[in-house]
Amino acid sequence: MIRTQVQLTEEQVRALRFLAGQRGVSMAELIRESVEHYLQETKETVDDELVRRAKEVVGKFSSGLADLAENHDRYLTGDEY
């Protein structure tokens, strides 16, 4: 683990100490769990946004190849039939 330092308000520290005591964990563990939860939530939001943006562009660009749907493997591999 990497040691880091953050500044919290007095209210945040009081609340964290209370919650940590209730759960029987250290404040550091509670903060690590909170950061992990936030990162997972943010990743899901980013993933959802990337999917949404990808769906937006589907069909907006033409390859100019009339037979692309039928011969996509050939175009992807460069194989000639």
Image (cartoon, rainbow, N blue to C red):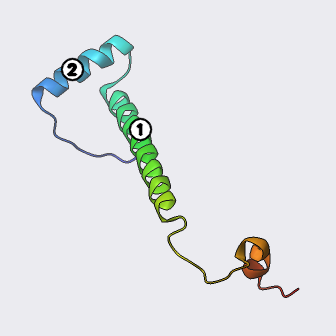
Which residue in the protein does label 1 denote? 36
Q: Residues within 10 Å of mark 2 (few under 14, many from 20)?
A: few
| SS of the residue under disc 1 | helix
Name the foreground residue: 4 vs 35: 35
Look at 74% across and 81% down and name the residue there: 75
Q: Residues within 10 Å of mark 1 (few under 14, many from 20)?
A: few
Q: In the image as oriented, which residue stretches furthest toward the left?
A: 10
Q: Which mark is residue 15?
A: 2
Q: CA distance from mark 1 to mark 2?
A: 19 Å
Three-letter code, disc 1: Glu
Image quadrant in which you'd find residue 67? bottom right
Look at 17% across and 20% down and name the residue there: 14
Name the foreground residue: 40 vs 51: 51
Name the foreground residue: 61 vs 34: 61
* Quarter that holds the C terminus: bottom right
73 vs 18, left or right, is right
Three-letter code, disc 2: Ala
Name the foreground residue: 62 vs 29: 62
Q: In the image as oriented, which residue stretches furthest toward the front?
A: 66
Percent coordinates x, y for residue 60 in the rendering? 50, 70
74 vs 59, left or right, is right
